[in-house]
Image: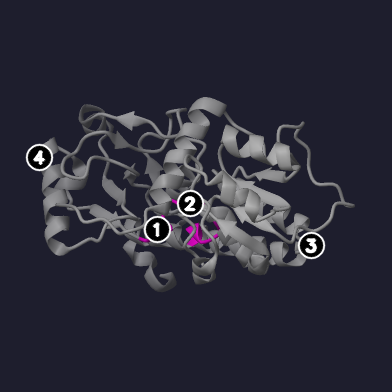
């Protein structure tokens, strides 16, 4: 049986993202009094000093900006950096503890996705809400810049973005000119068998990850951001490499053997014949924050082993 870690922030964040795009469409980042018209923060607005962060990515970015002390509450999925471990928990996007949120007296709530109950509470209390749109690499940068501006941390935001871009550029240079293998990426599936398989289409940071790492997303022409695909469609796509993102899984040699056998049982696949099936279990592999560059680096090394150590 697949053993999962106790906390599942990345998977729950992804589920929230899927629901968000399925029902809300592409929502622009905004700062507003909840329930009011969306607009960016005005220069005269006070710097927030009591922040509730619902998304793991938002909480991580706020801390990276040097404003972790301003966070007074987080969702149960905000586990990084370790400083967040002492912050009060206020539930999640789908099961918020509204009473505790109100008691924390926030002057800013940062969230990813939508929650009518949270937004209604914020409207009642007059609390500003910031919706991040970090489902692309550009969106991650934008979230860093906008939160930096709101928190009076513009210089820190510029440094984070510059470092992020520099690392991405270095990866692109290392894989430039190499062949681009066809990649199939899983972000969710049944643990005991290959069923209910979720992958990525265009317009997501995970699709961009494959491209920057020097591969071709076999479902990159699908406009749905996180499509569910069948075994037959996977066979037809003929991936040369299969990568499973499994941030909640404690991978063992026995489990890896079982999961590879599942792919062999599916049918003829170039990735299976070439023994190019990989499992990435980094806890932040599904979280759209600047740390995703570490996962892109790992995927680049999977696709192009000769790029290890800058080769």
How far apart marks 2 and 3 lie (CA) works out to 32 Å
Residues under numbered marks 1 and 2 in contact, where contact means CB atoms less than 8 Å apart: yes
Q: Is residue 268 above or below residue 166?
A: above
Q: Which residue is drawn at 54% across and 61% down?
A: 88
Near mark 1 (Cα within 10 A), the count class, few <14, some 14-19 or many ≥20, is many
The quarter holding residue 40 reads: top right
Near mark 4 (Cα within 10 A), the count class, few <14, some 14-19 or many ≥20, is few
Q: Is residue 134 left or right of residue 260?
A: right
First along the sequence among labels 2 and 4: 2
Q: In which quarter of the image is the C terminus?
A: bottom left
139 and 71: which is toward the camera: 71
Q: Measured from the top left, where is residue 164 in percent x and y? A: 59, 61
- The residue that mark 2 highlights is 212
The quarter holding residue 166 reads: bottom right
Q: Which mark is residue 300?
A: 1
Residues under numbered marks 4 and 1 in contact, where contact means CB atoms less than 8 Å apart: no
Q: Which residue is drawn at 75% across and 34% down?
A: 38
Which segment did they paint magenta?
282-293
- The residue that mark 4 highlights is 265
- The residue that mark 3 highlights is 152
Q: Residue furthest bottom?
A: 309
Near mark 3 (Cα within 10 A), the count class, few <14, some 14-19 or many ≥20, is some
How far apart marks 1 and 2 lie (CA) works out to 8 Å
262 and 287: which is toward the camera: 287
* Residue mark closest to the camera, 4 vs 3: 3
* Residue mark closest to the camera, 2 vs 4: 4
Residues under numbered marks 4 and 3 in contact, where contact means CB atoms less than 8 Å apart: no
First along the sequence among labels 4 and 1: 4
């Amino acid at each position: 049986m697949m053993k999962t870690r106790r906390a599942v922030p990345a998977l729950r964040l992804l589920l929230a993202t899927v629901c968000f795009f399925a029902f809300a469409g592409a929502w622009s980042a905004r700062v507003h009094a909840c329930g009011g018209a969306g607009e960016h923060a005005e220069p005269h607005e006070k710097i927030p000093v009591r922040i509730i962060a619902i998304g793991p990515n938002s909480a991580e970015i706020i801390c990276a900006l040097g404003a972790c002390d301003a966070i007074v509450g987080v969702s149960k999925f905000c586990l990084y950096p370790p400083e967040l471990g002492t912050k009060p928990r206020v539930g999640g996007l789908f099961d918020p503890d509204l009473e505790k949120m109100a008691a924390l007296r926030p002057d800013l709530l940062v969230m990813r996705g939508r929650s009518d109950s949270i937004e209604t509470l914020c409207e009642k209390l007059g609390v500003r809400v910031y919706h991040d749109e970090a489902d692309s690499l550009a969106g991650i940068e934008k979230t860093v810049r906008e939160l930096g501006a709101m928190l009076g941390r513009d210089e820190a935001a510029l440094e984070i973005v510059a470092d992020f871009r520099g690392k991405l550029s270095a990866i692109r240079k290392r894989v430039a000119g190499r062949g681009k293998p066809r990649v199939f990426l899983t972000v969710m599936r049944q643990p005991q068998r290959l069923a209910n398989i979720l992958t990525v289409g265009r317009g997501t940071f995970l699709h961009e990850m494959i491209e920057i790492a020097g591969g071709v997303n076999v479902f990159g022409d699908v406009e749905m951001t996180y499509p569910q695909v069948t075994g037959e469609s996977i066979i037809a796509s003929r991936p040369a490499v299969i990568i499973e993102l499994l941030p909640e899984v404690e991978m063992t040699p026995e489990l890896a053997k079982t999961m590879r056998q599942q792919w062999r049982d599916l049918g003829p696949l170039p990735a299976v014949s070439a023994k190019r099936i990989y499992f990435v279990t980094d806890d932040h592999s599904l979280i759209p924050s600047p740390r995703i560059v570490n996962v892109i680096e790992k995927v680049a090394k999977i696709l192009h082993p000769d790029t290890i150590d800058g080769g």
